Amino acid sequence: MTLNLINLKELGDKITPHLNLTIFVIFFGLLSAPTYGGALTKSSSVGLQAEIFYEGSPATHRENYRSNLSLSLDTEIEHSRENNKYFFHLFGRIDQNDSQKTRFDIREGYYQYLAPNFDFTIGLAKVFWGVTESVHLVDVINQIDWLENIDGEDKLGQPMVRLNIFKEWGDVSIFILPYFRQRSYFSQFKRLSTVLPVRLKAEFEGSLNSRNIDYAVRYQNYFANLDIGISHFRGINRQPMISMQEDKLIASYFIVSRNGLDIQYTKESWLFKLEFLNQRRLGRTYYASVGGVEHTIYGLNERHDLGLLFEYQYDDRDTLHLPTTSSNDDIFIGFRYSLNDANDTVLLLGGVQDQKDQTMIYSFEAETRIKSNWKAELTARAFSNVDPKNSIYSIFKDDFIKLQLKNYF
């Protein structure tokens, strides 16, 4: 009955509110106490977000608003009984200026069977691979939520069937991914949007469509101070090729094979990190890597910690066969300052410089709890000396500060 109500075609980039509501009602019914005779674990938050763009946009086609407000709702529901786990994560946002950012989405909704040496998951879930800070090369399972954060850290739920096997010689994860979710872009003429609007209907290579079945496998293990992960993915590339047709941009998706390696070595207060990616498309092979070091100085002002980060990004792709990337010859330097206080206050300052054209991207993030049920988050992004040929040129005057207050209940 559930499968008849869930039309997989509607689980694409723009999930309809009516279908989401149907799924929510079904899932909540499955998790109800009368059904399973147990209490649910629930966690919810409502957030008010304010964005301030402190420069006017020089683009005549773009709305030149200097501030933007939005309201978000985040709810997680979990029920565990014996070896069975049911998890549901609902997210919604209402935005003042951009209709694309006003949406209702199921971030996760899955059933998981847990056993001593394996677990099995079916549904919408999130997966993260990788060890580096500035770029996550090997992380490929989920589509990013570009509308929520342009740094790519937020993700959309991916429909999947996953089997994790735990052995003494390492852990193996096998994925079957039966549906692909497209990337969303900001509305036409809004801040942070592309120069031309991106057409909502994407194109797919050959006979592909969003119901293509992708697959992936990953092995991970640790040896003393060394953590290692090896992965393979075959399916639709999560980032599309962008081309111009008449007065619009077209997002085109294609099949790619990806082999990934991530390594982290711990030596006292030092972390040495490396991610390596091999991509193959249309008979051509491309390589990318990001590597660096993180050193933590403990006990500043008796209890504070300062992390020093350095990473180098390299990519040899050409834009005829793979999407444009700004991380092809870049250096990242960052600082993470943890107060280790009762409010879990953390500050992160970083900068990325393109070694080819000297484009700079600065970022600042800070978060702290206020009392027991409030949390404040501050994010800032600034773009400097942006070359007209750089992929971020369309937003070079969209420097912004974003403040969000969340109440947990």
Image (tube, grey):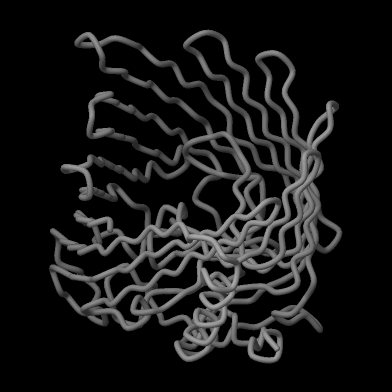
Q: Is residue 159 left or right of residue 96?
A: right
Q: In the image, what residue occupies the spot 56% across and 61% down? A: 87
Q: In the image, what residue occupies the spot 79% across and 44% down? A: 118
Q: In the image, what residue occupies the spot 25% across and 41% down? A: 367
Q: How many marks?
A: 0
The image shows residue 282 at horizontal and vertical percentages of 83, 63
| Quadrant hosting residue 86 | bottom right
Q: In the image, what residue occupies the spot 39% across and 29% down? A: 333
Quadrant of the drawing holding the N terminus: bottom right
For this rendering, which residue is in front, 191 or 331? Answer: 191
Residue 395: tell me if it is visible. yes
| Quadrant hosting residue 369 | top left
Is 303 drawn above or below residue 311 in the view shown?
above
The image shows residue 396 at horizontal and vertical percentages of 29, 59
Is 10 drawn above or below residue 347 in the view shown?
below
Quadrant of the drawing holding the C terminus: bottom left
Q: Is residue 341 left or right of residue 332?
A: left
For this rendering, which residue is in front, 382 or 179? Answer: 179
